[in-house]
Amino acid sequence: MSAEDVVLLDCWVSPFCMRVKIALEEKGIQYEERAEDLFGGKSELLLTSNPIYTKVPVLVHKGKPVCESSIIVGYVDETWASPPLLPSSPYARAQAKFQADYIDKKLFDAGSSIWRTKGEAQEVAVKDFIEVLKQLEKFLGDKDFFGGDSFGFVDIITIGITSWFSAYEIFGNFKVEDHAPKLSAWINRCMQRKTVAKVIPDPEKVYEFVINLKKMMGFE
Amino acid sequence: MANEVVLLDFWPSPFGMRLRIALAEKGIEYEYKDEDLRNKSPLLLQMNPVHKKIPVLIHNGKPVCESLVALQYIDEVWNDKAPLLPSDSYLRAQARFWADFVDKKIYDIGRKLWTTKGEEHDAASKEFLDCIGVLEGELEDKPFFGGETLGFVDVALIPFYSWFLVYEKFGNFSVEAEHPKFIAWVKRCMEKESVSKSLPEQEKVYDFVALMRKKFGIE
């Protein structure tokens, strides 16, 4: 099997794309990364393989597209069995999917609100974001990873967004570590993994990206 | 081991209906508990502390929340009968994608039809029909989204049919007129007892919405 069999339509700064890259790295799958210019003009392949949302990531496996990052990670897990990203018991799997769904619904949007707002609205946004972090700490408990002893599905769903935390901290004038120390420790633990360190971008580069994004979107 | 199944639900909820259908398809006996959402039970708050929402499937005392997560759980535990997801990993990903599409679109756009007016309302009417069209396209010539039998997407989507009188009256359209193939699929689903017994009467849902509109001062 060659890298051409697996193509990822990607954007380096997207936490959703990071999920898929980490999953593929964990499974030791060779893949071709195709960078999409989301502001300049989406490629023909992106428009035809994800006509409903025209968003990245899209995994194209032997010519067939899979869309929506959490669904793609599930597909990667089911297609390449080893090592398993989800636990084997149906109840533990349901817990993992529930937590991933919570993170999907809450984390990125809560963070985005921080850099899209000012003054009082921003203070509220920071407060809401911290509440989400506290819920994540409840999910984590005293475990090393969300799933237990091993790095798995929920860790993969969550770790990419943490590369945006530095930007949120600067704009919102707070420190994640002050409010969610266990989560901070979990972040450092994950960053020790080769697969994660390879994929996660430099938070400073993400911060610069957000500054430009703010300008482009007219949030000053 | 005793197999105790409890469903915390609310009778007009399409999300709760999904689980009712799945449990019926699999022939699983369960205790149904209707919640008063203005006065949530201690059990609901204990079983779903994160969202405090229904439906919650409680299996041998352990809760599973979020309807699509619970559907997959039901499919995995009771895997001897009426499989909802296919075995091929690509087809599974496609099924999850379309169920997710239903989740992202149908409920929220449908809600706008009876809670908004003017431009927002008209845009919602158009978008709702567009979504039905997209789903109709995805169905192609198959009897069900799952192929020959009810599948994951069918179970995720058909409950919204119980809200069609609401959507059509407030949206001012006829789904059958715009998308007859979709209604043909609806009728095939409704022929199944697991579906017809799990959905409330459209008139009952309509009366419920009329009451909600009065309560929230929407006219």
Image (cartoon, coloured by chain):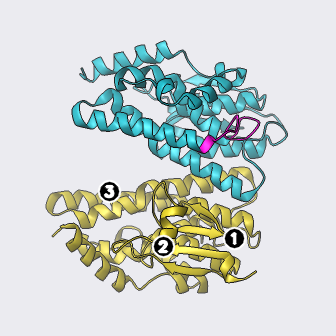
SS for dot 1: loop
- Magenta span covers which residues? B138-151
On-image quarter of the N terminus of chain A = bottom right
Q: Nearer the viewer, residue B218 or A147?
A: B218
Is residue A167 visible to the viewer in this orientation of the structure? yes
Give the chain letter for cyan.
Answer: B
Q: Nearer the viewer, residue B9 or A186?
A: B9
Q: Determine which of the numbered discs, if any, sits on residue A160 in the image.
A: 2
Circle 1 residue:
A62
Give the chain letter for yellow.
Answer: A
Q: Going 72% across and 83% down the picture, which residue do you hit?
A: A2
Circle 3: is it few (<14), some (14-19), or many (20+) Cα within 10 Å? some
SS for dot 3: helix
Q: Chain of mark 2?
A: A
Residue A167 location in percent, x, y?
Answer: 31, 76
Residue B146 location in percent, x, y?
Answer: 71, 41
